[in-house]
């Protein structure tokens, strides 16, 4: 006889796999097996997961259309069931799934649009923090600026794309108006952040995403700037930092310590 854990596992797996038989013990009022009742429950579960993805990825939904989106989301849902009863995190792997989904190969930017949408959700639910101001950073001794480590706002996310993904996303959210886009016009990197009550989305210059990624890894400004310059020799550190400060990107700073432990 199966234990409770095994029965629960079989039930959960059968919900998302139509090839599996109705789990033992699923009966109707007459006490007989009831595969039709289980099929209705199975359909409701999958439909609920698809609706969650539709709400979390509205631009992707608009781009591909409702019928196609439901088919694509249904395949994701059956292959990637929720791992937590808290549905806020559900669908975090959807952008990667889209990137490998052959039927959308003709829309190479779609996964990057989905990454912007996922970053928006994560920023919205991130912890609050008070951003640093320009005056806060001006208080740092000029000869030590290169050693400064900058702590990023908890809501800050960056995405990178070789396509104009941000432009496409903006055209396909509420109030947006789709127009022809030149996919060869160059890529767009995006900063998503919630410094106050609302999530804000900014296009950032080339190299800025590399800078932010390094700063987020705890690297000092000088090392982060070198990483940005490897992306483009035209990277402007002062202008980029000014833009990030204005966006509310930083919440604290410290000085890198040398081998002797001295700042």
Image (cartoon, grey):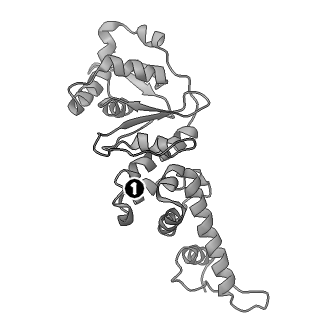
> From the viewer's perspective, is residue 245 above or below residue 8?
above
Mark 1 lies on a secondary structure that is helix
Determine the residue located farthest toward the right in the rendered image: 29
**Whether residue 90 is situated above or below residue 145 in the rendered picture:** below
Quarter of the view holding residue 48: bottom right
In this rendering, is residue 182 above or below 139?
below
Residue 25 visible here: no
Q: Which residue is depicted at the point 23% across and 24% down?
A: 234
Foreground residue, 37 or 84?
Answer: 37
- Asked whether, in this view, residue 225 is left or right of residue 42, the answer is left
Outermost residue on the front side: it is 180
x and y percentages locating residue 172 in the rendered image: 50, 46
The structure residue drawn at horizontal position 33% and vertical position 44%, both measured from the top left corner, is 182
Question: Does residue 66 appear in this view?
Answer: yes
The residue wearing badge 1 is 96
Q: Nearer the viewer, residue 148 or 239?
A: 239
Q: What residue is at 52 percent from the left and 22 percent from the top?
A: 131
Residue 190 in percent (x, y) is at: 41, 36
Residue situated in front as seen by the camera: 255 or 262: 255
- Judging depth in this view, the residue of 89 and 165 nearest the camera is 165
Q: Quadrant of the C terminus?
A: top left
Q: Position of residue 187 (x, y in %)?
A: 31, 40
Q: Residue at x 35, y 22 (%)?
A: 240
């Amino acid at each position: 006889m199966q234990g409770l854990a095994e029965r629960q596992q079989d039930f959960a797996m059968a919900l998302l796999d139509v090839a599996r038989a109705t789990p033992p013990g699923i009966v109707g009022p007459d006490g007989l097996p009831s595969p039709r009742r289980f099929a209705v429950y199975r359909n409701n579960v999958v439909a609920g997961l698809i609706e969650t993805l539709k709400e979390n990825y509205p631009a992707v939904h608009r781009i591909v259309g409702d019928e196609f989106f439901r088919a694509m989301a249904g395949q994701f849902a059956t292959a990637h069931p929720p791992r937590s009863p808290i549905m806020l995190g559900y669908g975090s792997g959807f952008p990667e799934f889209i990137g490998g989904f052959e039927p959308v190969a003709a829309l190479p930017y779609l996964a990057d649009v989905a990454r912007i949408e996922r970053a928006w959700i994560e920023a919205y639910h991130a912890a609050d923090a008070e951003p640093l101001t320009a005056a806060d950073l001006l208080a740092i001794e000029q000869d030590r600026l290169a050693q400064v480590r900058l702590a990023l706002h908890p809501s800050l996310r960056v995405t990178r794309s070789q396509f104009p993904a941000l432009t496409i996303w903006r055209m396909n959210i509420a109030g947006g108006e789709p127009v022809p886009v030149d996919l060869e016009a160059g890529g767009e990197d995006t900063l998503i952040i919630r410094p106050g009550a609302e999530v804000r989305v900014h296009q950032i210059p080339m190299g800025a995403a590399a800078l932010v990624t390094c700063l987020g890894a705890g690297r000092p400004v000088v090392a982060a700037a070198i990483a940005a310059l490897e992306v483009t020799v035209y990277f402007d550190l002062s202008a980029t930092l000014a833009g990030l400060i204005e966006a509310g990107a930083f919440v604290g700073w410290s000085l890198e310590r040398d081998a002797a432990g001295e700042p």
